[in-house]
Amino acid sequence: MMNFFSSTSPGSGSVGANFTRKLYFYAEVDLPTGKERSMTNEELIEELEKLVEKEEKIGEIWYYTHPLNGGWRLLNSVAYHAYVVFKTDQWWWSIEKNNESVILQRSKKIEFVRNHCIRNKRHESILNGVIACTKQKKVNSTVQEFIQHIHTEGFLNEDYHLLNKNCQEFADKIYGFF
């Protein structure tokens, strides 16, 4: 299926003119005072090694979607935002791409990564649809292997494009790694 209208969370619709080629990491996104760290692909390994438990085991992964802001229910089969949530022994994590950056966030509670992006509630409505898990699987990987994969594949260096380098394509590649 072609990804026609994949966008951001929260909203936007550009072809990626503002894409920073950075990953923004929110170590405790559920805390109002939680700080973000930004890093380029070249800084990724060194920076995240300081911030995360590398040997932490990833046990399960979920692929989520939600409707775009103002999206019509009929278009939601192609016009939706996609992201990945995964669980370790200590944290809930999500990773996603928007037209500005890649966002990696973690929390002790699933709702802060599944239902929110950087402390903003994800868009859903009775008319346009809700947050939905479209697939899930058990995995056997570590946070270190996951970070290494992002770095090696150069995902941060891939620009955003509305039609073919969007959140859906990114979520597909992340989910496919596991």
Image (tube, rainbow, N blue to C red):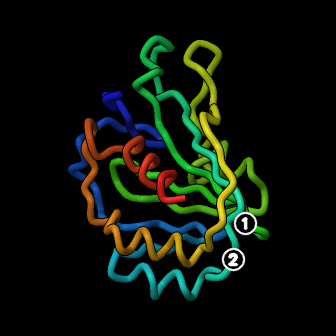
Residue at x-position 59% and y-position 12%:
127
The disc labelled 1 sits on which kind of residue?
Thr
Residue 59 position by quadrant = bottom right
Q: Which residue is mark 1?
A: 88
Residue 59 seen in render: yes
Relative depth, front residue between 1 and 74: 1
Above or below residue 33? Residue 115 is: above
Residue type pointed to by label 2: Glu
Using the rendered view, name the quadrant where residue 162 is placed.
top left
Label 1 element class: strand
| Distance from the alpha carbon under mark 1 to that under mark 2 | 7 Å
Q: Determine whether, in the image, residue 27 is placed left or right of residue 102.
A: right
**Residue 96 x %, y %:** 48, 52
Work out whether residue 121 or residue 23 is closer to the camera in this orientation and state it. 23
The image quadrant where one finds the N terminus is top left
At mark 2, the secondary structure is loop
Q: What number of labels is visible? A: 2
Depicted 164 relative to depicted 177: above or below: above
Give the numbered dot on residue 124.
Answer: none
Residue 137 in the image, given as x and y percentages of width and height: 66, 48
Residue found at x 69% / y 54%:
138
Contact between marks 1 and 2 (CB within 8 A): the answer is yes
Q: Residue at x 28, y 56 (%)?
A: 19
Mark 1: few/some/many CA within 10 Å (<14, 14-19, 20+):
some
- Residue hosting label 2: 56
Q: Looking at the image, which is closer to me, 70 or 165?
A: 165
Q: Position of residue 140 (x, y in %)?
A: 66, 66
Q: Quadrant of the C terminus?
A: bottom right
